[in-house]
């Protein structure tokens, strides 16, 4: 019974995480109704080491944009790449922003969180179904 309980809990947690990600995505879609073109002013990078000891270098665009005459600078949330040539200084990127809080931005058309949320939910359901029908 212990393995089934762990499997069920894992599946439920994955579904809850997926739902939280989807709610966050749809809330951003509702609140970030403004659009602006930002300029990449630099590309930051960080090395991430996985549990097997392998390093991956991630590249993050840092952008500058103006709304109502005010200048803003930020690293765009949930936008990164392992390809060092994907983001270049002085390139433009389309953002959507919250008109009431201009620092809340996301890349226009980026559905990564939508896809991620769906993946977590599907994974959770598969784990639950697999756990229920397993012969443990």
Image (cartoon, rainbow, N blue to C red):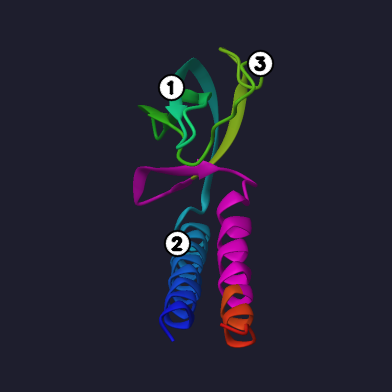
Residue 82 figure quarter: top right
Assess whether residue 94 is covered by the magenta stretch: no
**Looking at the image, do the residues carrying marks 2 and 1 touch, with CB atoms under 8 Å apart?**
no
Mark in front: 2 vs 1:
1
Residue at the (48%, 82%) spot, across then down: 4
Looking at the image, do the residues carrying marks 2 and 3 touch, with CB atoms under 8 Å apart?
Answer: no
3 to 54, vertically: above or below: below
Q: Which mark is residue 24?
A: 2
Q: Earlier in the sequence, mark 2 or mark 3?
A: 2
Cα distance, mark 1 to mark 3? 15 Å
Q: Position of residue 75 (x, y in %)?
A: 42, 30
Is 48 above or below relative to 129? above
* Highlighted range, magenta: 97-126
Local crowd at mark 2 within 10 Å, few (<14), some, or many (≥20)? some
Is mark 1 in CB contact (under 8 Å) with mark 3?
no
Any part of residue 64 in sight: no
Crowd around label 1: few <14 · some 14–19 · many ≥20 (10 Å): few
Q: Which residue is mark 3?
A: 85
Image location of residue 100, percent across then percent down: 35, 52
**Is disc 1 placed on a helix, strand or loop?**
strand
Residue 46's tag is 1
Residue 116 within the segment the image draws in magenta: yes
Q: Neighbour class for label 3 at 10 Å: few (<14), some, many (≥20)?
A: few
Residue 59's disc number: none
Residue 74 placed where, x, y %? Answer: 39, 29
The answer to which of marks 2 and 1 sits earlier in the sequence is 2
Task: Compute the Cα span from label 2 to label 1.
Answer: 25 Å
């Amino acid at each position: 019974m212990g393995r089934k309980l762990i499997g069920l809990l894992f599946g439920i947690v994955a579904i809850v995480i997926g739902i939280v990600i989807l709610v966050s995505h749809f809330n951003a879609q509702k609140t970030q109704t403004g659009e602006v073109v930002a300029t990449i002013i630099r590309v930051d990078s960080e090395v991430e080491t996985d549990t097997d000891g392998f390093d991956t270098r991630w590249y993050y665009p840092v952008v500058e944009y103006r709304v109502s005459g005010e200048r803003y600078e930020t690293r765009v949330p949930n936008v990164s790449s392992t390809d060092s040539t994907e983001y270049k200084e002085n390139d433009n990127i389309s953002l959507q922003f919250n008109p009431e809080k201009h620092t809340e931005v996301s890349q226009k058309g980026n559905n990564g969180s939508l896809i991620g949320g769906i993946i977590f939910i599907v994974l959770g359901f598969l784990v639950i179904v697999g756990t229920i029908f397993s012969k443990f």
